[in-house]
Amino acid sequence: MNLRRQKIEYGGSTMPKCRITVLKKMFDENLAKEYKRHVAPCALFTEGQEFIAETFEPPEGFCGWAWNDIYKSYLTLLLGGSFPGMKDKRTFITCCTTA
């Protein structure tokens, strides 16, 4: 998932928000069979799907497990932080670990 901090006009004031984009879905069936009971790719997200997060809660319709996985990165960007090595300091690529 790609997290990107941006400012969006809302009711006359500018508030920090974060766009969350599902870049790619990956699933390794062999690893899943070896280590997990549930063997299926994520059915909740589709590639290209986007969400706008603006609070400390997940956006409506966002998977709770995925939110838990990306939350630290989300907070860092929302509060103005950045990550070394990223071409755009307002962007970070992370993943959900449930698939």
Image (spheres, grey):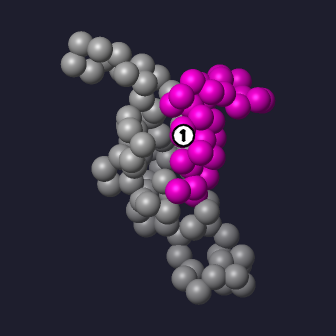
Check if residue 88 falls in the magenta segment: yes
Rendering coords of residue 38 (x, y %): 54, 82
Image height check: is 58 above or below 66?
Answer: above
To which quarter of the image does residue 98 belong? bottom right
Q: Give the quarter of the image for residue 93.
A: top right
Q: Secondary structure at mark 1?
A: helix
Q: Which residues are magenta?
A: 68-96
Residue at 39 percent across and 54 percent down: it is 62
- Across and down, in percent, residue 33 comes to 66, 84
Extreme residue toward the right, this view = 85
Can you give x and y, in whole percent of width and height, for residue 28 in the image? 67, 70
Q: Is residue 2 visible?
A: no
Say whether residue 85 is left or right of residue 3. right
Residue identifier under label 1 = 74
| Along the viewing direction, whichever of 43 and 9 lies nearer the viewer | 9
Q: Is residue 90 visible?
A: yes
For the residue pair 54 and 50, the one nearer the viewer reads as 54
Q: Nearer the viewer, residue 89 or 55?
A: 55
* Residue type beneath disc 1: Tyr
